[in-house]
Image: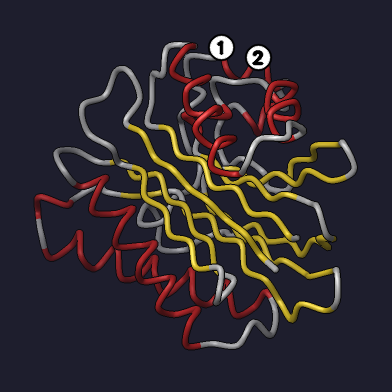
Amino acid sequence: MLEAFGISDPGCVRENNEDFFLTDTDAGIFILADGMGGANAGEYASRFSAEMLYRLLLQSAPDGLDTLNRDFAEVNSAVREAARRDPALEGMGTTLLVARTVDPVAERVEVQIASVGDSRAYQYSGGALSLITRDQTWVAELGLSDQALRRHPMRHLLTMAVGAAQELQVNSEVVDVKAGDQILLCSDGLHGVVDEQFLREALNSEKSLEDKCHYLVEAAKQNGGPDNITVVLIQLN
């Protein structure tokens, strides 16, 4: 059985929250988006993209990563068209991250992960934390360490985002999740501020998923909370 909890916080610096997330344990669909753009464009882009992707996934069977790629492309086209029609939305874009379960069998389940941008998915299993996604940022392509990435002045410069280009490059993986494993989805307001050792220790605690999410958000805020912070935790029981 899947259990999930999510929370989003504007952080300590920004007045608005351009992050958005959706969780549906019954459908096995979990989505996180971190928007960008002037005025309210970033908020619009993240919510619009997440909700559209959710609707598309509900209408399609989880029959392979090609389906996810097509759905991402359709969302990208819709975001670009919305920006073309409304000058107030010009230049908007968003990261987009989804985890989708495939045919649960006994105590194991396959999870499809697809992402654009630098929102991340981690898997915590057997005491180990592993990064599933790959950041699509300028500094990540330089091969810098995670510690160096957090300090780099250009760490937020994306090389790919939904709405930013006509051709979208989607990174996608299928991971095997067993009972007790956790999947962490987060925006860079968390992983860009809190190190992976802290994430591992938090997920290893006896706290509930809800308490873990609040704990992680508060940790990011204690470290300055320079960006919006979104955390979604999924566990197979």
- Image quadrant of residue 76? bottom left
Q: Are marks 2 and 1 in contact (CB under 8 Å)?
A: yes
In this rendering, the answer to whether 14 lies above or below 206 is: above
Report x, y in % for residue 87.
Answer: 9, 53
Mark 2 secondary-structure assignment? helix
Q: Choose between 10 and 88: the one closer to the eye.
A: 10
Task: Identify the disc placed on residue 148.
Answer: 2
Residue appearing at x 28%, y 37% in the figure = 17
The residue carrying pointer 2 sits among few (fewer than 14), some (14 to 19) or many (20 or more) residues within 10 Å by Cα, namely few
- Image quadrant of residue 104? bottom right
Q: Amino acid at mark 1?
A: Arg
Q: Amino acid at mark 2?
A: Ala
Residue appearing at x 68%, y 61% in the figure = 172
Here the colouring is secondary structure
Q: Which residue is mark 1?
A: 151
Marks 2 and 1, Cα distance to the nearest angstrom? Answer: 5 Å
